Image (tube, grey):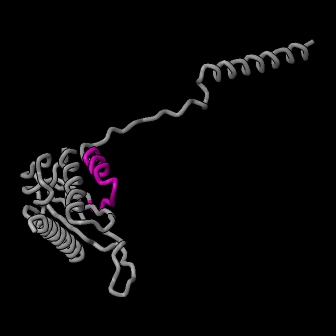
Amino acid sequence: MRSWIWALAVLAVVVVGGGAFAVGMLLGRGESRPPQVHLVPMTPEEKELQKIKIVASGGELVEASRDPEGWTVRVTYDVKPLGPERLHDSTLRFFRELARSGVPIRESSIELKTSDLKDVWGNTLKDVPILRVGLKRETFERINWQGFDANNLERVADEYWIHDEVKKSQQKQQGQDGSQDQSDQAGSGQGGQGGQG
């Protein structure tokens, strides 16, 4: 009879212990708690860097460094060889977006490169810089980017360089435009004289 009581006592302990364990798991007090996500807020500097990366997202952000005076931002973009006017428009678009971001700028520059030029032997040249524009803080802040004419970049930039091939293509285009205008004038002049004769 005593063995029967002992067996019943052991069985009761097992049932109570198992039940307590099951209730604990159901109530979520076990080891399988869901992981918690802790979001760390961004610092003001990290927010500014994020804005710069968004502005430079179409190209390569070469440098983005911060000091007490503001950010130094340098970017490069790959472009097709275009006339100076189109290159200036692309440059203006970058600086306008950088100003719109509200990030304090110490110095900024953009370099446009192309892989579409060829050497005198007909070989394709890779990553050839064709335009570089650099602005220091005073110049960058002085420009009204909403009303600025991109053709004035050469006059106001602290650093301005354009590849000779781009200059040549501009001169060639201007020459063709000039000769076209002259031939139009000559044609209209001849037509007028022919009408008189």
Q: Nearer the viewer, residue 52 or 88?
A: 88
At x 22%, y 58%, the residue is 91
In this image, 91 relative to 128: left or right? left
| Front residue of this view, candidates 84 and 112 | 84
In the rendered structure, does residue 38 fall within the stretch colored magenta? no
Relative to 83, 17 lies left or right: right
Q: Is residue 59 magenta?
A: yes
Give the residue displayed 24% in from the left and 43% down from the top: 44
Query: In which quadrant is the N terminus drawn?
Result: top right
Residue 76 in the image: state x and y as whole percent.
29, 63
Q: Specify the farthest residue to the bottom.
A: 121
Q: Position of residue 33 (x, y in %)?
A: 57, 30
User: Position of 63 compared to 178: left or right?
Assistant: right
Tell me: residue 23, above or below residue 91. above
Asked if residue 53 can be seen in this view, the reply is yes
Residues drawn in magenta: 47-63
- Please provide percent x and percent y for residue 100: 20, 45
Q: Residue furthest right?
A: 1
Query: Could you say which quadrant of the image residue 182 lies in?
Result: bottom left
Q: Nearer the viewer, residue 24 or 57?
A: 57
Residue 32 horizontal/vertical position (percent): 60, 31
Question: Can you see residue 160?
Answer: no
Front residue of 21 and 10:
21
- Residue shown at the point (85%, 14%) measured from the top left: 8
